[in-house]
Amino acid sequence: MTTASTEDAEKVLTGMYAAEAEYLAAGGPGEASFGLLAPFFAPDVELHQADALPYGGTWRGHEGMAQFFLAMGQAWETFDMVEQEFLATGETAVVLTQVRARARATGRELSFPILQTITVKDGQITEVRPFYWDTQAIAAACAGAASPTD
């Protein structure tokens, strides 16, 4: 197994975010195929969301990621990544994203940052850990949204 170079990690992340935009533009969860995103994620990928969120918990593998996107679609009417900055790249990348979103359950609009650590190995994302500044505000805005089984 080889580790990701800075250039490789940035290429994987840039490709994944472009595929995510395409996925959402095609209708997102329940409408578009997760196949647009699957090549960027290792088969055993793990996504660790804060437990306080309506989509909190650990999501594993491609099936888990597809279920995560469904849960996100239930929580958010819109979820736009309006600005993104790659703070570090390499095997562990750090990405700061400014989000503007509208909660489906309440109609409330929020703007907030997410800082993610993303592990890239052998050209695929193996782990994602997002950090939110205020999970309580997000959970309150999304009151009534679905949550996963862990």
Image: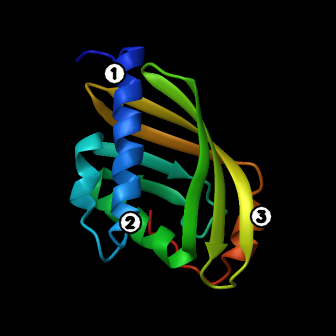
Callout 1 secondary element: helix
Q: Are marks 2 and 1 in contact (CB under 8 Å)?
A: no
**Circle 1: residue type:** Asp
Distance between the alpha carbons at the discs numbered 3 and 2: 28 Å
Task: Say which of 62 and 123 sits in front.
Answer: 123
In the rendered image, the quadrant that contains the N terminus is top left
Rendering quarter of residue 125: top left
- Can the viewer see residue 42 in this picture? no
Q: Which residue is mark 2?
A: 25
Q: Position of residue 17 (x, y in %)?
A: 42, 45
Distance between the alpha carbons at the discs numbered 2 and 1: 26 Å
Q: Are marks 3 and 2 in contact (CB under 8 Å)?
A: no
Tell whether 24 sits left or right of 133: left
Q: Position of residue 68 (x, y in %)?
A: 42, 63
Q: Is residue 123 above or below residue 3?
A: below
Earlier in the chain: of badge 3 and badge 2, it is: 2
Q: Residue at 69%, 85% (x, y): give it.
A: 106
- Can the viewer see residue 8 in this picture? yes
Q: Residue at 25%, 55% (x, y): give it.
A: 36
**Circle 2: residue type:** Ala
Q: Which residue is mark 1?
A: 8
**What's the mark number on residue 69?**
none
**What's the mark number on residue 136?**
3
